[in-house]
């Protein structure tokens, strides 16, 4: 049967051998398992060698990439699809790849690209792949080609518009003259614009100063030439002035310690700056429907400025919603996609990229640090980064993108750390070691304006080493350092309360035992992850030192700066949490400086009265541990132009308030306070002895953290729901810190 290449029907002799009269010989076939065993063993060994080689290649080219199956699947799903290419097929050659590409081209799927059409200078129509609009445009182009090849018809062809924008909700309902009536005189608006670009923009891009100045000249010179189509641009001017009022106190030569001197007639009313800003803000809030209907790049900038203005008021509420609207309108204009065609010139491309990545970084930070869903997935964004200053082919945009590119990098790193830490909350205990190793590798490769160079050092020594630092940097550079500190605190902060509690003999009971608790004896397996906590504490000390440096220098602390207030507050929370867990007062000096700084940032007036009272209670409790030092008063310098602008703005506000409120009310309208604070009354704050629960450490556990505590509600949220909304839980957290000294 083998010779005849026919199937044997079995039997002895078989049917065919009996028919042909031949002797039938049958050799028993070896068992199937024994026959395939060498080949199977060889295949497994080849797969192991192949996996080892691929792992070494991945570690070399992608050091931050985890090699567990879940991370590899997640990364693979995030990659763009490669039609016709399968790297797992061993017999793949260049010819087969070319054939697959030809087969793919024959389908015509390469025409499924996103559509980005420029309608006017600031309006762009975007439509994604496989959308209704793209499909209808394919049909239209096919029909146009058929009509062009067919004989000319006697009937005239109707022109179909490419794209139609929704008109204004009520055309002509808003008069530009009504908006111009709210503006201060021209010198004062120029002063507020200078304050905005000097103090509030930091390293982000919101608008060109030259463009704002030209529009202000038109508004003051000839407002009648502007129509209702210019409402969005006018709203941007109002929001620039509104944000400028939040930082105008930095241009005042009056010191907080001297504001109480003199009679009440010479003192300005409380929160008069926020009163002016709220007037501009409320006018823009009335015009939000027209801004949304416009749907232009100017609308994106208006919502970004609204979000910037709302960050000190309600970061996780108003600020989050306005920044989400900025992202949505930017998506409508295709700013999140790469420009596939030469639709824009180089300057317009650079402006669009700067605006998009500024809105993306601001929205993503609020989403990460305040526990909110993101407005868009990172896999859906393929927009190019802004061009760096050293890139050839410079544009006309007068803006240095160096620090913006650094912020984009840190934001992407924060997303990666959040993904790993979120997995750590719900992963099986067997996978925790792999995730922690990945966090450690990512942490070691994290670079920025500040990195924890010296670990496990007391705060006093680190402060002394930083006292010989170079001259004070600008506010933008200091904000970049604060952003790095905030990320390091975000990485290590959840592990502080989840850290296994020390034995009673290793805890700090007295102030003179600080040095013994700085280096507590830990298991050898714990030290490889314990640096996460130490780096978080180092970052907290660094952030407080930066805020203290700004407070005691000519730069000054900005009361409405989200970067300064949030980093200072997060630093206090980290140091207090570590002091509670270790029962130590080694951070008393840093806490004193941080409390002094945050108290000054919260001293806006009556609106922050409850927050100041709580901070005063904390300060009184700390006075029992150390003697507070009086803040250094910097001698007043000669800033004639800024002083004239500040005093002129105050005089204009006083005159307008007197004429608009004859009954004696000092506010132009119901103000939106710079700090919408809701805190418990100071009488509820009291000293409470902290009772630390004793727990036994499992010697078989190799983790220095209680992973079950990471699953507790709220422990993974870095900042509470509101920037200035202290909940009862946070109040209890502060009260637990206030134990009497031993």
Image: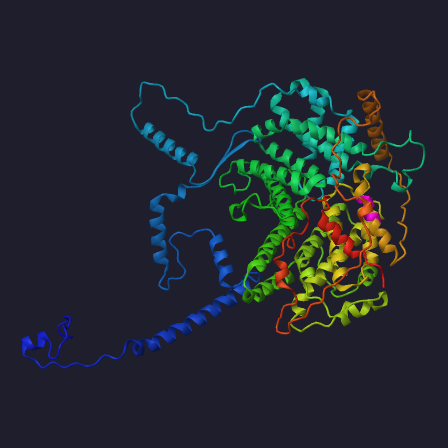
Q: Nearer the viewer, residue 631 or 93?
A: 631
The dominant secondary structure in magenta is: helix
Q: Is 107 one of the magenta-colored residues?
A: no
Query: Can you see residue 581?
Result: yes
Q: Tell me where the magenta segment starts and ends, as one range.
A: 611-616
Q: Is residue 52 above or below residue 133?
A: below
Q: Nearer the viewer, residue 234 or 561?
A: 561
Q: Quadrant of the C terminus?
A: bottom right
Residue located 72% across and 39% down the image: 313
Res. 49 image quadrant: bottom left
Q: Nearer the viewer, residue 519 or 640?
A: 519
Q: Quadrant of the N terminus?
A: bottom left
- Please tell me how many numbered marks the rendered image carries: 0
Q: Position of residue 609 (x, y in %)?
A: 81, 40
Q: Position of residue 707 (x, y in %)?
A: 62, 63
Q: Position of residue 734 (x, y in %)?
A: 77, 53
Res. 42 image quadrant: bottom left
Q: Is residue 664 shown left or right of residue 333?
A: right
Q: Is residue 178 above or below residue 342?
A: above
Q: Position of residue 290 (x, y in %)?
A: 60, 26
Q: Is 612 one of the magenta-colored residues?
A: yes
Res. 537 image quadrant: bottom right
């Amino acid at each position: 049967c083998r010779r005849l290449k026919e199937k044997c029907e079995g039997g002895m002799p078989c049917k065919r051998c009996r028919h042909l009269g031949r002797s039938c010989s049958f050799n028993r076939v070896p068992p199937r398992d024994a026959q395939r065993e060498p080949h199977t063993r060889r295949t497994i060994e080849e797969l192991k060698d192949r996996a080892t080689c691929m792992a070494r290649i991945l570690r070399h080219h992608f050091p931050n990439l985890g090699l567990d199956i879940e991370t590899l699947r997640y990364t693979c799903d995030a990659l763009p699809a490669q039609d016709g290419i399968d790297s797992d097929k061993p017999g793949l050659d260049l010819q087969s790849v070319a054939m697959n590409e030809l087969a793919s081209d024959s389908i015509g799927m390469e025409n499924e690209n996103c559509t980005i059409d420029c309608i006017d200078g600031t309006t762009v129509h975007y439509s994604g792949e496989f959308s209704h609009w793209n499909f209808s445009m394919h049909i239209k182009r096919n029909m146009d080609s058929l009509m062009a090849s067919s004989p000319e018809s006697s009937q005239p062809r109707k022109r179909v518009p490419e794209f139609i924008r929704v008109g204004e909700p009520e055309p002509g309902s808003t008069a530009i003259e009504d908006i111009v009536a709210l503006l201060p005189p021209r010198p004062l608006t120029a002063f507020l614009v200078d304050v905005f670009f000097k103090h509030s923009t930091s390293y982000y891009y919101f608008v060109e100063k030259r463009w704002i100045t030209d529009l202000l000249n038109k508004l003051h010179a000839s407002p009648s030439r502007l129509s209702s189509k210019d409402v969005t641009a006018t709203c941007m001017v109002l929001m620039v002035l509104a944000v400028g009022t939040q930082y105008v106190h930095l241009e005042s030569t009056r010191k907080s310690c001297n504001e109480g001197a003199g009679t009440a007639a010479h003192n300005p009313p409380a929160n008069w700056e926020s009163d002016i800003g709220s007037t501009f803000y409320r006018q823009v809030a009335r015009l939000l429907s027209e801004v949304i209907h416009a749907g232009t790049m100017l609308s994106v900038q208006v919502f970004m400025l609204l979000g910037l203005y709302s960050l000190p008021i309600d970061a996780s509420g108003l600020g989050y919603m306005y920044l989400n609207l900025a992202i949505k309108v930017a998506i409508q204009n295709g700013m999140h996609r790469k420009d596939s065609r030469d639709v824009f010139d180089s300057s317009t491309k650079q402006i669009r990229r700067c605006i998009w990545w500024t809105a993306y970084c601001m929205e993503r930070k609020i989403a990460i640090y305040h526990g909110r869903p993101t407005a868009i997935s990172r896999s859906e964004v393929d927009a190019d980064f802004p061009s760096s200053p050293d890139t050839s082919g410079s544009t006309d945009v007068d803006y240095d993108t160096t620090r913006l590119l650094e912020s984009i990098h840190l934001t992407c790193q924060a997303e990666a750390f959040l993904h790993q830490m979120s997995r750590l909350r719900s992963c099986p205990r067997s996978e925790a070691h792999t995730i922690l190793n990945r966090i450690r590798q990512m942490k070691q490769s994290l670079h920025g304006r500040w990195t924890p160079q010296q670990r496990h050092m007391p705060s006093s020594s680190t402060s002394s080493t930083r006292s010989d630092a170079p001259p004070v940097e600008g506010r933008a550079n200091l904000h970049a350092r604060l952003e790095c500190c905030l990320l390091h605190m975000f990485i290590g902060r959840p592990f502080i309360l989840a850290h296994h509690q020390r034995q009673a003999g290793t805890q700090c009971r007295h102030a003179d035992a600080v040095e013994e608790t700085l280096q507590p004896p830990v298991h050898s397996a714990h030290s490889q992850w314990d640096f996460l906590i130490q780096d978080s504490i180092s970052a907290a000390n660094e952030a407080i030192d930066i805020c203290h440096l700004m407070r005691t220098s000519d730069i000054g602390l900005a009361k409405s700066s989200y970067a300064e207030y949030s980093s200072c507050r997060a630093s206090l929370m980290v140091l207090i949490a570590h002091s509670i867990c270790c029962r130590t007062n080694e951070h008393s000096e840093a806490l004193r400086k941080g409390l002094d700084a945050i108290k000054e940032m919260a001293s806006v007036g009556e609106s922050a009265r409850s927050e100041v009272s709580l901070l005063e209670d904390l300060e009184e409790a700390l006075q029992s541990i150390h003697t507070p030092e009086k803040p250094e008063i910097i001698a007043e310098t000669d800033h004639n132009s800024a002083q004239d602008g500040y005093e002129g703005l105050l005089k204009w506000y006083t005159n307008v308030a007197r004429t608009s409120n004859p009954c004696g009310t000092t506010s132009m309208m119901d103000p939106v306070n710079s700090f919408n604070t809701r805190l418990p009354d100071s009488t509820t704050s009291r000293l409470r002895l902290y009772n630390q629960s004793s727990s036994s450490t499992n010697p078989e556990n190799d983790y220095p953290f209680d992973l079950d505590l990471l699953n507790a509600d709220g422990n993974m949220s870095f900042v509470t729901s509101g920037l200035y909304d202290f909940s009862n839980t946070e109040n209890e957290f502060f009260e637990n810190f206030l134990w009497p000294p031993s």
